[in-house]
Amino acid sequence: MIELKTKRLVLRDLMLEDANAIAERIAPLQVSRYLAMVPHPYNLPDAEAFLTHVVKEQANNPRAGYEIAITKKNDCIA
């Protein structure tokens, strides 16, 4: 697992537990309309499917890609 820390932020691998935060932040049309591969409406099952794929790829093929979470220290996804 990758984890980089600064004074305010943590960059880390995505986890299945990030699903609610991702779904909440991508759901608004003002966000999803600028993302080429994101359906609208974007909901929790979409986020869970995405994260399941990412976590599986991280395990099977480490560092072939870099899908990471940027969080504030002691917070969920920022």
Image: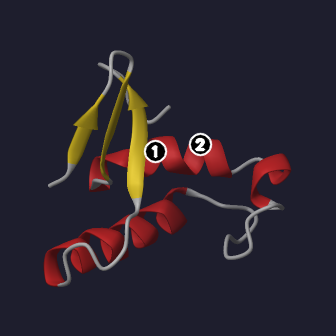
Residue 54 location (% of width, % of height) = 34, 71
Looking at the rendered structure, the kind of residue marked 2 is Glu
Q: Secondary structure at mark 2?
A: helix
Residue 62 is situated, as x and y percent measured from the top left of the image, at 19, 75
Are the residues at dot 1 and dot 2 in contact (C-beta closer than 8 Å)? yes
Marks counted in the figure total 2
Considering every residue shown, the one lying at the far bottom of the view is 60
Q: CA distance from mark 1 to mark 2?
A: 6 Å
Residue denoted by label 1: 20
Q: Is residue 45 left or right of residue 1?
A: right
**Residue type indicated by callout 1:** Asn
67 over 77 or under it: above or below: below
Colour pattern: secondary structure
Query: Looking at this view, is 10 or 22 the one in front?
Result: 10
To which residue does mark 2 refer? Answer: 24
Q: Is residue 52 shown left or right of residue 69?
A: left
How many residues crowd around disc 1 within 10 Å: few (fewer than 14), some, or many (20 or more)? some
Picture quarter with the N terminus = bottom left
Using the image, determine if residue 12 lies above or below residue 5.
Answer: below
Query: Residue 74: which numbered mark, if any?
Result: none
